[in-house]
């Protein structure tokens, strides 16, 4: 069964502090992992995907197949990072449905 | 606006009524997806189209739900005999097939409230 688990519903940090949003997955084949973000009153948008191996807005995420994790990290959080973050997966090389976690609401306090 | 658009943005209806939502994908995107999101949950897949063909339907899509994509352009999602449990945000996404490297772009959603 395909499953994405985001154990933290809420995460609150101070500006300038490091932040890590956890994501664990369960998938029988080879998955492709994504992080989507939804800022207040905006639509869901792609933040990054594991195959790109790039940093977006200072965020990075590494796929750890041994631990089946894809945690999102940023060394110095900014207030504008406050948003809802969703981890998602789909079959590697597939173009079908995304399976989402329940999301983590990140609040960065001044 | 070249993004995915959805109409209406909000819909309030009484239990038992039928409702229809529309999604206009990004121009030339050949794939279109419908998801449903309830409070405290992430989006859950309902169905998707490649051009006009409906290729997959979730078990969440009961026989009261029907989706179409005539001519492979816009799509409609109809819910017949609505129930209070249908209250949710209905999201549409579109993508351009790219050998498995595509990105799904989401619309703003239609929020349905069934009284």
Image: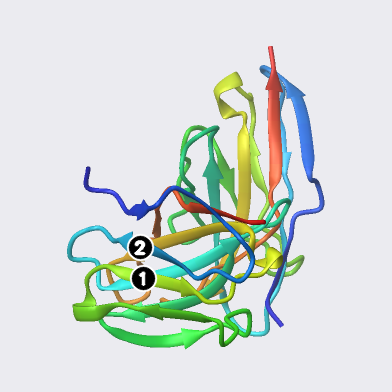
Please state which of residues B114 and B100 is positioned toward the viewer in this rendering. Answer: B114
Left-right relation of A31 to B108: right
Q: Quadrant of residue A73?
A: top right
Q: Residue at x 63, y 79 (%)?
A: B60
Q: Please name whichever residue, B22 or A13, is drawn nearer the observer in this view of the structure.
A: B22
Q: Residues within 10 Å of mark 2 (few under 14, many from 20)?
A: many
Please say whether residue B80 is visible from this viewpoint.
Answer: yes
In this view, which residue lies farthest toward the top? A110
| Label 1 crowd (10 A; few <14 / some 14-19 / many >=20) | some
Give residue A13's position: percent from left, percent from top. 76, 25
Query: Mark 2, chain letter?
Result: B
Does A48 sit above or below residue B51?
above
Q: Are marks 2 and 1 on the same chain?
A: yes
- As drawn, is A93 to the left or to the right of A26? left
User: Spatial distance from mark 2 to mark 1, Cα to Cα?
Assistant: 5 Å
The quarter holding residue A40 reads: top right
Q: Secondary structure at mark 1?
A: strand
Q: Quadrant of the N terminus of chain B?
A: top left
Disc 2 marks which residue?
B22
Side of B78 where A11 appears, left or right: right
Q: Secondary structure at mark 2?
A: strand
Task: Say if mark 2 contacts mark 1, CB within 8 Å.
Answer: yes
Residue that carries the numbered disc 1 in the rendered image: B76
Chain under disc 1:
B
Task: Residue B79 in the image: state x and y as whole percent.
Answer: 51, 73
Q: How far across and down, in percent of the image, does residue B36 sit?
A: 57, 64
Percent position of residue A9, x then y: 79, 45
B11 or A81: nearer the eye? B11
Label whose residue precedes the other's in the sequence (2 or 1): 2
């Amino acid at each position: 069964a395909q499953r994405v688990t985001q154990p933290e519903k809420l995460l609150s940090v101070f500006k300038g502090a490091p932040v890590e949003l956890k994501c664990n997955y369960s998938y029988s084949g080879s998955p492709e992992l994504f992080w989507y973000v939804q800022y207040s009153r905006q639509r869901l948008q792609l933040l990054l995907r594991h195959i790109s191996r790039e940093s977006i807005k200072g965020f990075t995420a590494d796929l750890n197949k041994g631990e089946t994790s894809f945690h999102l990290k940023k060394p110095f959080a900014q207030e504008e990072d406050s948003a809802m973050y969703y981890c998602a997966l789909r079959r590697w090389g597939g173009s079908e449905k995304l399976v989402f976690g329940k999301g983590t609401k990140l609040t960065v306090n001044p | 606006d070249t993004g995915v658009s959805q109409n209406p943005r909000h819909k309030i209806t009484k239990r038992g009524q039928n409702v229809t939502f529309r999604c206009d994908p990004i121009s030339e995107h050949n794939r279109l997806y419908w998801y449903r999101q309830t409070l405290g949950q992430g989006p859950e897949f309902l169905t998707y189209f490649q051009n006009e063909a409906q290729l997959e339907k979730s078990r969440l899509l009961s026989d009261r739900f029907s989706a179409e994509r005539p001519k492979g352009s816009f799509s409609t999602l109809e819910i017949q005999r609505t129930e209070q449990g249908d209250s949710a945000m209905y999201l549409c996404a579109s993508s351009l097939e790219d050998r498995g490297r595509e990105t799904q772009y989401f619309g703003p959603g239609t929020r349905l409230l069934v009284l």
